[in-house]
Amino acid sequence: MAFVGLKYCVFAPIKTETPFTPIVYDTGVVLGRMIGANITFNRNSEPLYADDGMAESDNSITGGTISLNLDDVEEEAQVTAFGLLKSGEPGSEVYSEVGDPAPYGGIGYVRVRMLRGVTSYVAYWLHKVQLAVNTDNASTKGQSITWQTPTADGTILAAYPNADKKAYYRDRAVFDTEAEAYAWVDEKAGIGA
């Protein structure tokens, strides 16, 4: 697949999660405009040897990691996605990072695909992720500007949203228009519902 773009990152905290039933998400938020997204799935890799050779192999997914590079993440989105605490009066709010874990939630985004001269939009939904900003680098402005953008890293966990009792990690759907892809992600995240 040839991809030529990446857009629209949303996060929706998990409201209720009961095994083998659909996950219910709280209202989602747009995290920021996307610069990059790297997903690595961990897979079983233990072969079974028999008669002096590999007889069986299992490459099923066991979890994964995600790294999102965004242009910025508004404070309200940080409260929703990273578990920051907000206190104070409007206009003088304080956002505190505490030792509590970040909430579990779903993440959606859209990739732009070009195939045989035809553009389509592939929307993705990761069912259960826990995000965090693990590094915060800053540098002074010199003779030229060096853009400093946040990276949010996360763990991708198994979700069991269906009666089939299988572990689910990511859904995707392909659309002809960008608006349809955004609407699919919004519906998953409960945005605009």
Image (tube, helix red, strand yellow):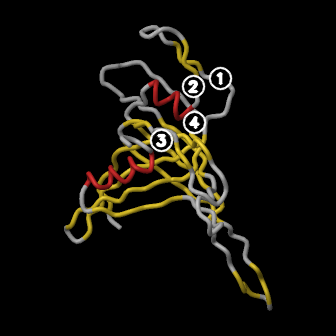
Q: CA distance from mark 2 to mark 4?
A: 10 Å
Mark 3 or mark 1: whose residue is earlier in sequence: 3
Q: Amino acid at mark 4?
A: Ala
- In the image, residue 152 above or below residue 187: above
Please tell me whether mark 1 sits on a helix, a strand or a loop. loop
> Can you identify the residue that label 1 sits on?
98
According to the image, label 4 marks what residue?
Answer: 132
Mark 2 lies on residue: 84
The reply to whether callout 1 and callout 2 are in contact (CB within 8 Å) is yes
* Structural distance between the alpha carbons of marks 3 and 1: 20 Å
Element under disc 4: strand
* Badge 1 or badge 2: first in the primary sequence: 2
Q: Cβ–Cβ below 8 Å for labels 3 and 1?
A: no
Element under disc 3: strand
From the image, state whether disc 2 or disc 4 is nearer to you.
2
Residue type at mark 2 is Leu
Residue 45 on image: x %, y %: 68, 69
For mark 2, give the secondary structure: loop
Task: Please state which of residues 6 and 136 is positioned toward the viewer in this rendering.
Answer: 6
User: CB atoms at circles 4 and 3 under 8 Å apart?
Assistant: no
